[in-house]
Image (cartoon, helix red, strand yellow):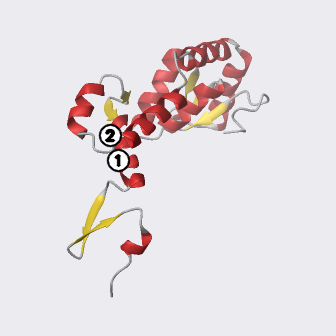
Amino acid sequence: ESLLHDSHTKLFISHGGLKSVVETICAGVPALVVPFFAEQIRNAHLMEKAGVGVVISKFELTIDNLLIKSRQILNQDIYKRKIDKLRDFISDRITDPNFNAMFWMEFLVRHPNLDDKKFLRLRANQLRLDICDQKVDLLQVFKKTTDVCTGNEMIHKDQRCVNYCDPNLMRDST
């Protein structure tokens, strides 16, 4: 990541995976994308449509095509301007996302006996993240994490309840 954020980095060659796309946008570096399968193809074309990258098909990947497309990005500052605009748009938030995540983690620690389903219904609209057409409920991840770390998550082992966080109780009795 630090290499991508270096001021000397002018172009990022990527396969177009979700994490690469996010890192590219956050770094404000235009991308040359060579997608191989799955969501990479869609991500690559979305980047090209947004004007923040150029796509080369894996079937057309040659040294000449790589040089032509790289020069296209490097010689036209429109790619840099558009990715900077996209980065600014995406990072513009009313609150710091780290603060928001910490608040909800601490909230769940303060309220360990909260009914998951009831709470999720109340907060579902606030903590829904839509990535690649799949809804991921961040709160459920936070709840599970805090349950494990606060000892509220229990598993049954040898007909007794064992706490995840206590390594002494996790040992086999044999």
Mark 2 crowdedness (10 Å alpha carbons): few <14, some 14-19, many ≥20: some
Of the 4 image quadrants, the one containing the N terminus is: top right
Viewport quadrant of the C terminus: bottom left
Q: What residue is shown at x 60% (from left), y 30% (from top)?
A: 24
Residue at 60% x, 15% y is 88
Mark 1 in CB contact with mark 2 (< 8 angstroms): yes
Q: How crowded is mark 1: few (under 14 residues within 10 Å), some or many (20 or more)?
A: some
Residue nearest the viewer, comparing 50 with 148: 148
Eyeballing the image, is 114 above or below 10? below
Q: Quadrant of residue 89?
A: top right
Image position, residue 166 (x, y; %):
41, 66
Question: What separation in Å lies between label 1 and label 2 (alpha carbons)?
Answer: 6 Å
Say whether residue 172 is left or right of residue 26: left
Image disc number at residue 144: 1
As drawn, the residue found furthest toward the right would be: 8
| Number of numbered tags placed on the structure image | 2
**Do we see residue 33 in this rendering?**
no
Identify whether 49 is placed above or below 164: above
For label 2, the SS is: helix
Taking depth in this image into account, of 81 and 140 the one nearest to the observer is: 140
Can residue 154 be seen at all in this image of the molecule? yes
User: Which structural element holds mark 1?
Assistant: helix
Image coordinates for residue 114, horizontal then vertical, percent = 27, 40
Q: Which mark is residue 162?
A: none
Tell me the quarter of the picture where residue 68 sits: top right
Question: What residue type is disc 1 on?
Answer: Lys
Q: Which residue is drawn at 31% across and 31% down?
A: 135
- Residue, far bottom: 174
Residue 140's label in the rendered image is 2
Amino acid type, callout 2: Gln
Above/below status of 57 relative to 151: above
Query: Residue 150 versus residue 172: which sits nearer the camera?
Result: 150
